[in-house]
Amino acid sequence: VEHVVVVGAGLGGVRTVEQLRNQGYRGRISLVGAEPHAPYDRPPLSKQILTGAWAPERIVLKDAEALAGLAVDTHFGVPAVGLTAGAVELADGRSLAADAIVVATGAEARRLPGQPDGVHTLRTLDDALALKAALEEAPSLLVVGAGFIGAEVASAARDRGLAVTVLEAGPVPCERALGPEVGVLCGRMLTEAGVDLRLGTTMAGFADARTVRLAGGTRLSADVVLVGVGAVPRVDWLRTELDLDVTNGLACDASGRVLGADGVWAVGDVAAWDDAGHGGRFRYEHWTSVTDQAAVVARDILGVEAPAPAVPYFWSDQFGLKIQMAGRPQVADSVVPLQGEGLAGGPVKGTVAGYFAGDRFVAVAGFGAAKQVARHRMLLVRGAEKSEVLAG
Ligand code: FAD
């Protein structure tokens, strides 16, 4: 391998470059990034950047000097616009021929039909700085969608003293990630912090950038409106003759090799890796999964044996509590309290929930319970049985 082109200069792109060098690869690396900024980390965008606790410089993953130290040719502010077998085409007309191509283009914030300009979404540093500036001026915020991003923005806005309303079509917040039983706890965190949480509320559309129309005809207005309804994998640029499956991100095998494209790998939010052992192909939007995948892909490119896949893990910081989830809650058929009273209506803090598929322990969620989550993460790695987990 003499030239690796990495498309997307976010977490996945940077981790891939680091891993290639860590594995001793001395050939050429080109890193292509649509944004003009040095690669940066996204989790703080909805947390420390919004609250103003951190300046943007603090979230830089690799500055120009660090990238030069890794001997990387950077092409920032120039999106890739096409992929062929063995080359990446850039928006400025250049074509980068490569022995190996890694797609790490992430995802973009999903927009709602008819969403006017001036309604915020949150995915990039520029989005976060625009939202922060708007929150500094505004007395009220309306959030559409009670997923993690919506809840974290609600938390940052309550910190700043704004009146916050959150609309959610589903029966509980964060249902997709945590399931209905545990999602209830996120709902309690929102309402206990003074958020006006409206569950089971369907939006009919926007009247303008500050006003949404609800299904029954009611209108709701706020000074700032944020839409947080998930992210769409960035496969739009993959204009290609190749026969790729992009049903839910780029379909890959268990080593991140893109199906239908020799010499092309994908990592991170854009990639759906095969995990037949757990019943399918999964696309994770988790910080740690990106890092784990980059380690596998760099080794696979260089023909080195890859590490065993890790248990999926993510966290969210809201209203002073760290929520953590490890494992695959989507395959669970039951949820059992392991610690704390939250699932029985008591305090959320300190609650730990175990997810089981029959007798198999498949996931753990914790609220301000880092030690317990760490311990259960080890049990997940070991493939512990339900009886052992319940025995404590
Ligand atoms: P990204 O980090 O999105 O990077 C992709 C890069 O590719 C971007 O810089 C983009 O500009 C670039 N790109 C796109 N198209 C092109 C193109 N055609 N050509 C060139 N470049 C292109 N995860 C957690 O586990 N915990 C958290 O608390 C958490 N909080 C988050 C908060 C926010 C606001 C966001 C947005 C995400 C959060 N995540 C969190 C998720 C985590 O940040 C992502 O999983 C991770 O950033 C994915 O990395 P990635 O490299 O796949 O994509």
Image (cartoon, grey):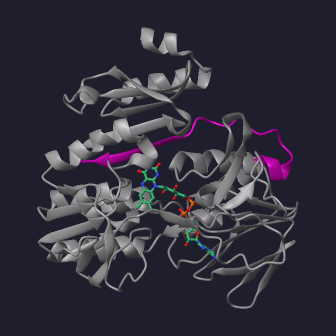
Q: List x then y, in percent, for residue 322.
A: 32, 40
Q: List x then y, in percent, for residue 309.
A: 68, 37
Front residue of 54/197: it is 197
- Quadrant housing residue 134: bottom left
Q: Which portion, as a residue range, is magenta?
A: 299-319
Q: List x then y, in percent, for residue 199.
A: 26, 54
Q: Is residue 10 magenta?
A: no
Q: Is residue 306 magenta?
A: yes
The quadrant of the image that shows the C terminus is top left
Question: Residue sitting at 81 percent across and 48 percent down?
Answer: 300
Q: In the rendered image of this protein, does residue 196 appear above or below residue 311? A: below
Front residue of 69/240: it is 240
Question: Residue sitting at 47 percent across and 59 percent down?
Answer: 41
- Quadrant housing residue 139: bottom left
Front residue of 168/40: it is 168
**In this figure, what is the number of numbered marks?**
0
Q: Is residue 31 left or right of residue 83?
A: left
The quadrant of the image that shows the N terminus is bottom right
Q: List x then y, in percent, for residue 13.
A: 63, 61
